[in-house]
Image (cartoon, coloured by chain):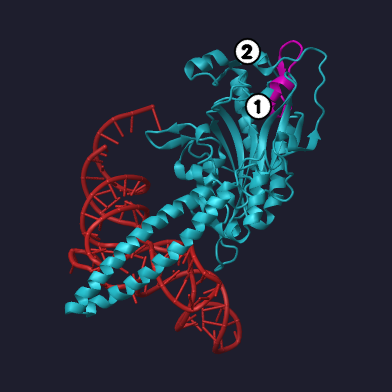
Chain colours: A cyan, B red
Amino acid sequence: MLDANLIRDDPEKVRRAIIDRCYDVSILDGFLAADGEWRQAVDRTNRLKQERNRVSHQIPGLSGEEKTAKIEEMRQVSEEIKTLDGRISELDSSRREALLNMPNLPHYSVPVGADENGNIISKTCMKERDFDFEAKEHFEIGEDLDIIDFVRGAKVAGSGFYVLKGDGARLERALINFMLDLHHQQGYREVFPPIIVNDESVIGTGQLPKMADDMYHMEKDGLWLNPTAEVPVTNLHRDEILDASELPLLYTAYLPSFRREAGRHSDTRGIARVHQFNKVEMVKFVRPEGSFDELESLLLDAETVIKALELPYRVLLLCTGDMSFHASKCYDIELHAPGGDRWLETSSCSNFTDFQARRAMVKYRPEPHLKSEFVHTLNGSGVALPRTMVAILENYQNEDGTVTVPEVLRPYMQGQRTIG
RNA sequence: GCGGAGAUGGCCCAGCCUGGUAAGGCGAUAGACUGCUAAUCUAUUGUCCGUAAGGACACGGGGGUUCAAAUCCCCCUCUCCGCGCCA
């Protein structure tokens, strides 16, 4: 959510940002109209309430006709206030709705572009692997080794779900433990939050109202299945004023994530796009002034995971049109999957500046007794499991059909060197 | 799920029965005072509208009654205690 004062003071800056991000600018004009009317109405109701308060306090000292007259007068003022307050609440809703649907302002360093073609490859690491045999795709490998079972996943839950079996399940668990341990060493505190979240949380981080159709909703309880650990972890501190001395706060969490993937029909084969997947996530609460440096270090922390796994990857700096709407700046890490010669988005590291903090009311006091301010929040996957699994299976596959276990994972698999 | 008790400012806590500008304490910050510290005194310590002066709002959330609601009425959420159920 943007600062209403900033929008009033510099609407053209906001208009530029909305255009760069390919959103409809009418949302800005809608806000300005509702906001102007809202402020006038608030001013008028405040004056009326002042009058009512003043006279109401005089009434106990009055008697007879004068008292009756004042009471009648105030009854009418109260009626007027009630009508006006109703109008204010309508205006406030449209104001707020416009605010909730307005994207964050991109950082000046973000390239302007309409779609993924505007993204910039900011770094490429480790050469893609050359094969002297025909590389298989991960779903073939998984089925041949009987470690990924799509048929039974579909039986138990439906299309888009899968079962990890044997060394596949063990590899998944090894990855989770390896990543959590690494992030722990990097200074992140491990948490395991609820996997089900309420409306306030999902609004707080910005998935609602825009992404409602992408999440699983439990109507009976009014709750949502976690779409990304960013939601419960960031909302740990919703409606809190943090102690400045405890910033930056760094968290890491392993959490299953759920996406409905409504309306997406391509890319359904395999485990690269599924309804339920595990992810290890990093979340930072930081002071505003250093937040873009914190983004760079967050990216490095995520890259460390990939480097340790010795997988070929590249880092993209996303352009204005391709960033998710709550980010101010975002890097994607893509892993190379040689089976299908594809680049898979495996991590997304974003600085949301004060956008989420303002929605979720996460503040801190820069100095004792000074006015509290919004923190900046950041989030990075470190990293998404299925696509990492794809990259491992495809990059570490051997001609005989086996898969070598990456060296850093062996301690997590009782020293096992190969699968198959 | 049932019964009971609660939720008041950054924190603690009074006020509720019997409606009339949210009392007191703690902590924090600034100033005053004192060789230093402590103590003491004073001020500040939530949100919104407003350039400001000023004003409004805020007693878990939402409705209602009333000239006026922390206080009375209704609905909801959460916490604690007991009972029930349960991996």
Q: Chain of mark 1?
A: A
Q: Earlier in the sequence, mark 2 or mark 1?
A: 2
Residue A392 lies within the magenta run: yes
* Displayed quadrant of residue A163: top right
Q: In the image, B20: left or right of A37?
A: left
Q: Chain of mark 2?
A: A
Residue position marked by numbered label 2 in the rendering: A143
The quarter holding residue A268 reads: top right
- Neighbor class of circle 2 (other Cα within 10 Å; few <14, some 14-19, many 20+) is few
Name the quarter where the C terminus of chain A is drawn: top right
A382 up-or-down from A277: above or below: below
Q: What secondary structure is found at the residue carrying circle 1?
A: helix
Counting from the top left corner in percent of width and height, residue A246 is at 59, 56
Residue under numbered circle 1: A387
Q: Which mark is residue A42?
A: none
The answer to whether B80 is drawn above or below residue B25 in the figure is above
Residue at 23% across / 71% down in the picture? A71
Residue ID at (43%, 63%): A42
Using residue A51 as the reference point, say whether residue A212 is left or right of it: right
Of residue B4 and residue A7, the one placed in the foreground of this image is A7
Q: Does the image show residue A342?
A: yes
The percent coordinates of residue A347 (x first, y second) are 67, 35
Type of residue at label 1? Arg
Q: SS of the residue at dot 2?
A: helix
Q: Which residues are magenta?
A: A391-411
Tell me which corner region of the image, top left, top right, bottom left or bottom right, holds residue A125.
top right
Seen from the viewer's position, the closer of residues B16 and B30 is: B16
Q: Amino acid at mark 2?
A: Glu
